[in-house]
Image (tube, grey):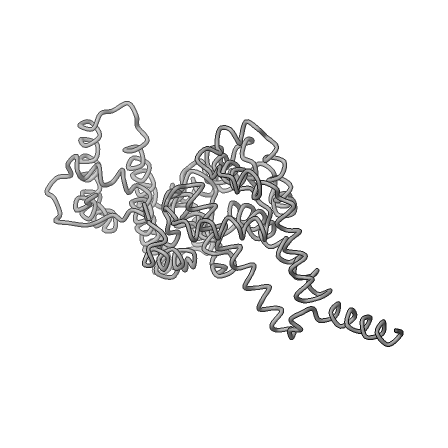
């Protein structure tokens, strides 16, 4: 009898130390990375792109798998996540934004992102107004809305398979989304990084973390084109979520509804017309991104001239110091940089004219008091001034603009 107890005790100790699978440390690491990556894929493909923004339709196989996995690996409720995210877009960077670092502070969003989600999830008005169209079948009502059961089952599975170390793996699985999505994307993604487009909010891109967070690091791209199923727009950007969507589309498991619009070029028209105006407005973010490249080229030419003239270092430093703000909308320039920007514009008439005409171009889609014919007339006048300005990059931009097609 004592021998049997000893054998049982040894078996229990062995199970506690190694679990049923008895994996090596690197196999355990691979398991943790693999399962957390599935969770990231489920969040970006199902919750974010499919449910929140309706940028693609998913077939029943991936849809039900993602729902089950999110219940198991996060305990998040689809309606709550979707409603909070939609409200974030609707109220972005305002006091009503559930998790903006611009209003709540970066430290709070990074450290307490998950708490901010849970707090907003208790807001019945948010769920009613922004949570429409999410799954409401028997599984959702009776299983997936019980957010404690899924993670509890995952804990049991991990401990059974890996023993005591399963607790550590489970903890990593549970904090993966709160840290990367609620913290990094919602925090740093609205505070630090580069911007391809002058979106109305403070969103930024955070490459090169694409594999870790599934393409969600391309946050500025997403906020510019929120209904696009594809987040990458530049050749050097990698959206692994889009890779998975493309594979599922080939398998017949997904149907993409929308991708980022592209400004096409045709024959250069003698005069910009209403179709040109339509193409510019439809692709306004891309138009302004191209204009920003022209501004940078003009700045470089001004710096080269200063070098040739052996200008004082302070003159060079002034232009370089404001270079990062020259392509930004006026309300996005920090108050501390506005004085330097005014000095740089006064010292460089070419830069001043580029920025003045940038704002005039932007008014084509901001002005709501003029009809299409009047706006077309303004566009034609703008192109005439640009091509008569004597500024090479501005003239070249205007000519290409007259070739724009929707």
x and y percentages locating residue 136 in the rendered image: 49, 37
- Point 10% across, 42% down: residue: 270
- Point 50% across, 59% down: residue: 209
Residue extending furthest toward the top: 369
Q: Nearer the viewer, residue 51 or 161?
A: 161
Query: Would residue 276 be found to the left or right of residue 74 on screen?
Result: left
Residue extending furthest toward the left: 270
Residue extending furthest toward the right: 2
Query: Would residue 367 be found to the left or right of residue 318 on screen?
Result: left
Image quadrant holding the C terminus, namely top left
Number of numbered discs on residues: 0
- Occupied quadrant, residue 385: top left
Query: Would residue 64 be found to the left or right of residue 248 on screen?
Result: right
x and y percentages locating residue 11 in the rendered image: 77, 72
- Point 28% across, 37% down: residue: 361
Query: Would residue 114 be found to the left or right of residue 366 on screen?
Result: right
- Occupied quadrant, residue 301: bottom left
x and y percentages locating residue 372 in the rendered image: 20, 28
Residue extending furthest toward the bottom: 3
Q: Nearer the viewer, residue 345 or 28?
A: 28
Q: Nearer the viewer, residue 254 or 113?
A: 254
Q: Nearer the viewer, residue 174 or 317?
A: 174
Image quadrant holding the N terminus, namely bottom right
x and y percentages locating residue 77 in the rendered image: 56, 42
């Amino acid at each position: 009898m004592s021998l049997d107890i000893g054998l049982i005790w040894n078996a229990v100790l062995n199970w506690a130390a190694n679990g049923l699978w008895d994996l090596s440390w690197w196999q355990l690491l691979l398991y943790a990375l693999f399962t957390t990556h599935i969770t990231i894929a489920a969040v970006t493909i199902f919750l974010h792109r499919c449910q929140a923004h309706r940028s693609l339709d998913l077939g029943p196989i991936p849809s039900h798998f993602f729902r089950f996995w999110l219940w198991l690996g996060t305990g998040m409720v689809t309606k709550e996540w979707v409603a909070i995210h939609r409200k974030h877009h609707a109220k972005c960077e305002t006091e009503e934004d559930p998790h903006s670092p611009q209003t709540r502070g970066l430290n709070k969003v990074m450290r307490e992102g998950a708490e901010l989600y849970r707090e907003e999830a208790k807001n019945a008005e948010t769920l009613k107004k922004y949570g429409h169209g999410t799954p409401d079948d028997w599984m959702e009502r009776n299983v997936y809305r019980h957010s404690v059961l899924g993670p509890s089952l995952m804990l049991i599975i991990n401990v059974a398979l890996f023993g005591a170390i399963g607790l550590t793996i489970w903890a990593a699985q549970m904090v993966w989304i709160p840290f990367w999505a609620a913290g990094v994307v919602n925090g740093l993604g609205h505070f630090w990084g580069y911007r391809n487009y002058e979106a109305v909010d403070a969103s930024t891109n955070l490459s090169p973390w694409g594999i870790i967070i599934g393409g969600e690091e391309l946050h500025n791209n997403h906020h510019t084109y929120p209904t696009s199923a594809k987040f990458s727009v530049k050749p050097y950007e990698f959206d692994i979520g889009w890779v998975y969507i493309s594979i599922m589309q080939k398998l017949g498991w997904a149907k993409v509804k929308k991708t980022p619009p592209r400004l096409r070029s045709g024959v250069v028209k003698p005069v910009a017309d209403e179709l040109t105006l339509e193409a510019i407005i439809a692709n306004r973010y891309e138009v302004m991104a191209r204009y920003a490249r022209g501004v940078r080229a003009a700045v470089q030419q001004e710096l080269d001239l200063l070098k040739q003239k052996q200008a004082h270092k302070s003159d060079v430093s002034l232009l370089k110091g404001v270079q990062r703000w020259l392509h930004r909308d006026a309300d996005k320039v920090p108050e501390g940089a506005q004085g330097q920007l005014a000095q740089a514009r006064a010292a460089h008439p070419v830069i001043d004219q580029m920025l003045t005409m940038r704002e005039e171009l932007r008014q084509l889609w901001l002005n709501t008091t003029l009809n299409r014919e009047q706006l077309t007339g303004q566009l034609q006048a703008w192109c005439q001034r640009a091509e008569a300005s004597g500024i090479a990059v501005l003239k070249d931009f205007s000519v290409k603009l007259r070739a724009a097609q929707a």
